[in-house]
Amino acid sequence: MSRSRRAKLQLFRVVTFVLLGAFFLGPIWFMFEFSTRGVGENSPRTLDAWKEIGTYPDLVAGIVASLQLAVITSVGILVVLVPTMVWVRLRLPRLRRVIESISLLPLTIPAIVLVVGFSPMYQWMGINLSDSILTLSLAYAILVLPYAYRALDAGLAAIDVKTLSEAARSLGAGWFTVMWRVIVPNISSALLNAGLLSVALVLGEYTIANNLLYPNLQVEIVSLGRTNAGVSIAVAVASLLFAFVLLVALSFVGGQRGGRRRTRERLVQTFGRDFSGGTR
Amino acid sequence: MMGGRRLSLDWIGAVPFLGYVALFLFLPAAIIVAGAFASEGGVTLINFANLSRPYIVSAIVSSVILSAVTAVGGAVLGALLTYAIATGNPRSTFRRVVTSACGVLAQFGGVTLAFAFIAAIGPASAVYVYLSQHHLDYYASGVWLYDLRGLELVYLYFQIPLMVLIFLPAVDGIKPQWREATESLGGGTWSYWRYVAGPLLAPAFLGSTLLLFANSLSAYATAAALINQGGPILPLQISNAITSEVGLHEPGFAKAQAVVLIVIVAIVSVLYAVLQRRTARWLQ
């Protein structure tokens, strides 16, 4: 490569990274800036908006509800998915493709379409079963299903499920023991990945909650934004930071071996790779 | 005898999962399709005929334009960023950080993203206050941030990183030897891009653009948080039709709109898959 071409290429790279870097970091920086503003012009920086978060009961209720939903959804999806995936690998290999395509299906259905179908179901459930906001976790599990499936599939592919479970069975273990004491400890990092992705997704969810009229965290942030922008932006920053910490944890947690780290990086990247799923 | 019985027991293991997806994935899908075509006591196309209402037509048109603009804009800017990443050291920490950041940012949307832009360039932002005091009032003809034009800008924030994620593997597949071969045959930069790299990357680029189009078309939360009034795009109209009074009188109307949206997304996804296969033939 000639020297002038190399210099031109370097210039192009620097300009691209700086301009797009500003476009991507700017809005996040200005959210911090906005949430630490004082009341008047030229007033000093203050954390008043952050301190006020606790004084809005609806907002606090939304935060609590979203955290509960995050926990219920991620535990629920793991409880349903892990035994199914292990069982299919052991006993129903012909069903594996079917389970995979079903699990990835929600990626191609926009959340706003899904919620049209959920709406009459939740009306019925609200009258006949329960109108608790926590019932949303049933719908959220569908949203997180593709991401959890991929994380778990990567984990199960790395171990020999068949040999492990046959060994445990021949030593007299029941199926519960096989799952809980043999499989689960061996795919612990995949379980963590699946759980973290689910939590990040649920905390950012707005479409389904808003259209089913359940006030979760994001719905409360929007409604508060109409009256007190400072506080609602402070909460938005906090939830963003929390999701960011989760995803950074995801790319670093327990990663010593190169192969595993690469898997995890791929996971973080594929997290964003799909359209229509997630929280956009 | 034993084999048959064991087989039936084996199937039971998959029942909890299949039961759950039947209730919360296939049932909603069935409700949408059935509801879109159902009327009291029969099949009807009235819900689809109602889509010709002017505000729905204009929402569909706006959605398609918005998606096309942000898909092309995101694809071009994303391709530049991809090239900048691909020409660096493939093992550097910088590249790892940038691609991981793209993974996070492509998923960063919805309420938080809308608020970030309101805080950054909205009418109360430090940027606007400063610039308007210095004769650069970019809202002189109205606050376009809360409008379709605002959405075009804000959507780029997740479109560009998404483009990087899906286009980078194709760009990484281009081998430096091909450029050397072009040069040894007397070709310059122009002929390399025109006859070698361009045609190789074109299917991947087009496919990625289609994916961005579908992505923008299905986005709801960002627009809902940014736009307070009316429903200029299809996802917002669907939401209006579910939650408003009108929705109670015409339960099939939201479902017909949902069918339209999913049909467009499905067509685009199929085209994407076709182009993806073409890309895979050359670049793996």
Image (cartoon, grey):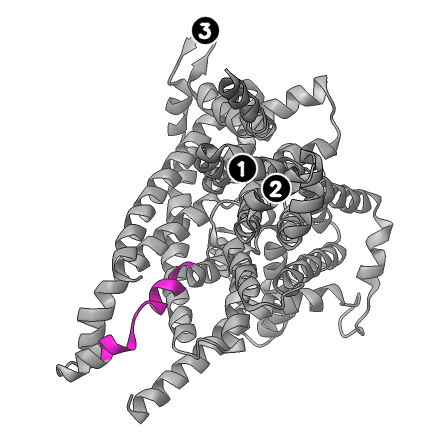
Q: Quadrant of residue A235?
A: bottom right
Region of the chain picked out in magenta, as a range:
B166-179
* Residue A90 numbered tag: 1
Q: Do the numbered discs 1 and 2 sit on residues whose CB atoms are within 8 Å? A: yes
Q: Chain of mark 1?
A: A
| Residue sitting at x 74%, y 24% | A130
Q: Do the numbered discs 3 and 2 sit on residues whose CB atoms are within 8 Å? A: no
* Residue A165 numbered tag: 2
**Nearest the camera: B56 or A91?**
A91
Residue A46: give x, y in percent of width and height. Answer: 82, 69
Q: Is residue A99 above or below residue A243?
A: above
Q: Is residue A218 above or below residue A172?
A: below
Element assignment for label 1: helix
Q: Nearer the viewer, mark 3 or mark 2?
A: 2
Residue B250: give x, y in percent of width and height. Answer: 51, 20
Element assignment for label 3: loop
**Nearest the camera: A6 or A188?**
A188
Cα distance, mark 3 to mark 1?
47 Å
